[in-house]
Amino acid sequence: MLAVICSVTLCAVGEPHKLSALHGVGRDRDRFHTTVRRLTRDPLRDQGPRSAALRPEMGRYLDRDIVDWYRAHTTLFPSEHAFLADLERRPARRLLDAGVGAGRTTEYFAGLADEYVGLDFSPAMVDVCRTRFPDVRFEVGDVRDLSHFSDDEFDVVLFSFNGIDSVGGDSARQRAFGELRRVCASGGRLFFSSKNLNQLPDDRRLSVQIRRALAADDAAAVPLRVARGAGRFARARALNPSARRIMSRGGGLVADDRDGRQILRHYYVRPDVQVSQLQALGFSEIEVYGMDGERVASDQLTRVRGWWLHYLCRST
């Protein structure tokens, strides 16, 4: 499992294999100012025509600017890089790359399986993938319904970039995980990332936002960063009046505008709750990794920070 790689490489500081996270992900990206007045007027509304079959959050990935943004980024996260190294040692027979987007992971993982299938619900994303990788199989599909795949069809399933957090609330999320479990062969591995509910309270604490602003290297930028931090605090409060309930139950849909342009709802989950849900679905040997690639100890799951985490588990 990935723990073997972690013990040799990921836990060492400054190892050359460690890659930088995607530019702008997990950082302050409020470059596009959005007022609290607009956000509170109708915080969960759909902001444009979308396919009737897609929820607003999913429809966002049909937009050309988002497709272009995904196409521009090809860097792997440290945990993904470690899993890639593991697959190089133990290639997959059949690999499903769910939520493949514009093919960020394709160029790394497609060659490590006898058969690779990239899947995404956005036809625009799939078109980009087919153009970039004409010899690779891509399909338009929804992870909540993988009926066109047979049981136990894949021995490795990927679902990167928090794609699982866009499928919907509790029932839709469980349905997606159930389908991923069904198509994952016994002994096969599921590797995915999800947003970390433990991090959410930071956006709801004005003191945290101010501390971040005051830590700016450029003193001239402090006033603007303070204003942005205060705005982020106000937006988080206004958009999610039920955040306390979500945090107490360990997961739920959270409205945010972290892309700076449109309000989206994504699922945030506490890591210990996610681990329990995976166990209930029939996954075992569950390992959790931070964005820096370090494995998270089981006694740290209720308080580990970082905007998202990676999970590796085995189907049993």
Image (tube, helix red, strand yellow):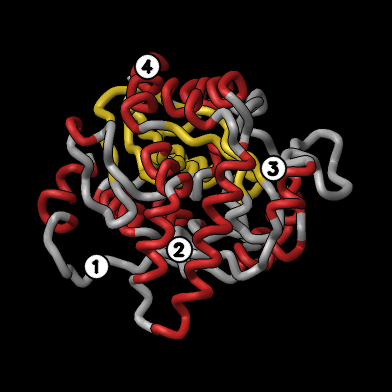
Mark 1 Cα shell of 10 Å, populated few (<14), some (14-19), many (≥20): few
| Quadrant (top left, top right, bottom left, bottom right) of the N terminus | top left
Q: Which residue is mark 2?
A: 27
Disc 1 marks a residue whose amino acid type is: His
Compared with 156, 314 (above or below) is above
User: Where does the image place residue 198, in percent across and percent down from the top left?
Assistant: 37, 38
User: Where does the image place residue 12, in percent across and percent down from the top left?
Assistant: 12, 60
The residue positioned farthest toward the right in the image shown: 49
Disc 4 marks a residue whose amino acid type is: Gly
Q: Mark 4 or mark 2, which is nearer the start of the sequence?
A: 2
Q: Mark 3 or mark 2, which is nearer the start of the sequence?
A: 2
The secondary structure type at the circle numbered 1 is loop
Give the number of the mark in front: 2 or 4.
2
Give how far apart the Cα atoms at labels 2 and 1 are. 22 Å
Q: Nearer the viewer, residue 136 or 34?
A: 34
Disc 3 marks a residue whose amino acid type is: Glu
Compared with 245, 215 (above or below) is below
Give how far apart the Cα atoms at labels 4 and 3 are. 28 Å
Q: Mark 1 or mark 2, which is nearer the start of the sequence?
A: 1
Give how far apart the Cα atoms at labels 1 and 3 are. 34 Å
Mark 3 Cα shell of 10 Å, populated few (<14), some (14-19), many (≥20): many
The secondary structure type at the circle numbered 4 is loop
